């Protein structure tokens, strides 16, 4: 049985100005936002070496992460959702 993709999950959402600095200003589905965020994190070596679940925020990410300098993966998803409409 093939699962049908969740329409709400695939709906293109507009990123906030802070998030747009990382993922671009075009409307994107959540899956693509997450993918682009991870590309940015890896490109800029922002993943904690000892605890891979933690992301060390640079100036662009701090704007998205409510000013926090370190967030874990699960917290990241919650904080990023606030920047999508």
Image: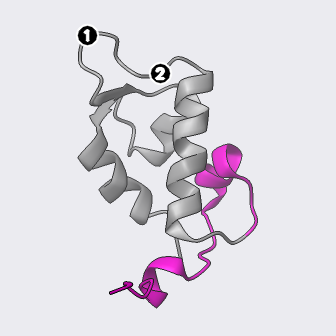
Q: Is residue 71 left or right of residue 84?
A: left
Secondary structure of residue under mark 2: loop
Secondary structure of residue under mark 1: loop
Task: Name the residue at 74% across, 61% down.
Answer: 25
Residue under label 2, please give it: 46
In the rendered image, the vertical position of residue 64 relative to residue 33, given as above or below: above
Give the number of the disc on residue 50. Answer: 1
Give the number of the disc on residue 20. Answer: none
In the rendered image, the vertical position of residue 63 relative to residue 41, given as above or below: below
| Image location (x, y in percent) of residue 82 | 41, 65
| Image location (x, y in percent) of residue 33 | 56, 57
Among the 4 quarters of the image, the one containing residue 5: bottom left
Task: Name the residue at 62% across, 24% down.
Answer: 43
Task: Name the residue at 40% across, 44% down.
Answer: 65
**Quadrant occupied by the N terminus:** bottom left
In the rendered image, the vertical position of residue 73 relative to residue 49, given as above or below: below
- In the rendered image, residue 2 lying in the magenta stretch gets the answer yes
Q: Residues within 10 Å of mark 1 (few under 14, many from 20)?
A: few
Q: Which residues are magenta?
A: 1-26
| Image location (x, y in percent) of residue 7 | 48, 89
Q: Give the distance between the C-alpha atoms of the residues marked 2 and 1, in whole angstroms.
A: 12 Å
Among the 4 quarters of the image, the one containing residue 68: top left
Query: How many badges with numbers are in the image?
Result: 2
Q: Residues within 10 Å of mark 2 (few under 14, many from 20)?
A: some
In the image, farthest residue toward the front: 1
Q: Is residue 47 left or right of residue 15?
A: left
**Mark closer to the observer (2, 1):** 1
Q: Is residue 61 left or right of residue 47?
A: right
In the image, 3 versus 53, the foreground residue is 3
Task: Name the residue at 60% across, 62% down.
Answer: 16
């Amino acid at each position: 049985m093939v699962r049908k993709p969740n329409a709400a999950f695939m709906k293109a959402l507009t990123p906030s100005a802070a998030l747009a600095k990382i993922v671009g200003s075009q409307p994107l589905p959540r899956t693509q936002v997450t993918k682009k965020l991870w590309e940015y994190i890896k490109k800029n070596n922002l993943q904690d070496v000892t605890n891979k679940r933690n992301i060390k925020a640079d100036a662009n990410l701090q704007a998205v992460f409510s000013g926090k300098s370190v967030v874990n993966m699960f917290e990241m998803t919650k904080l990023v959702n606030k920047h999508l409409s």
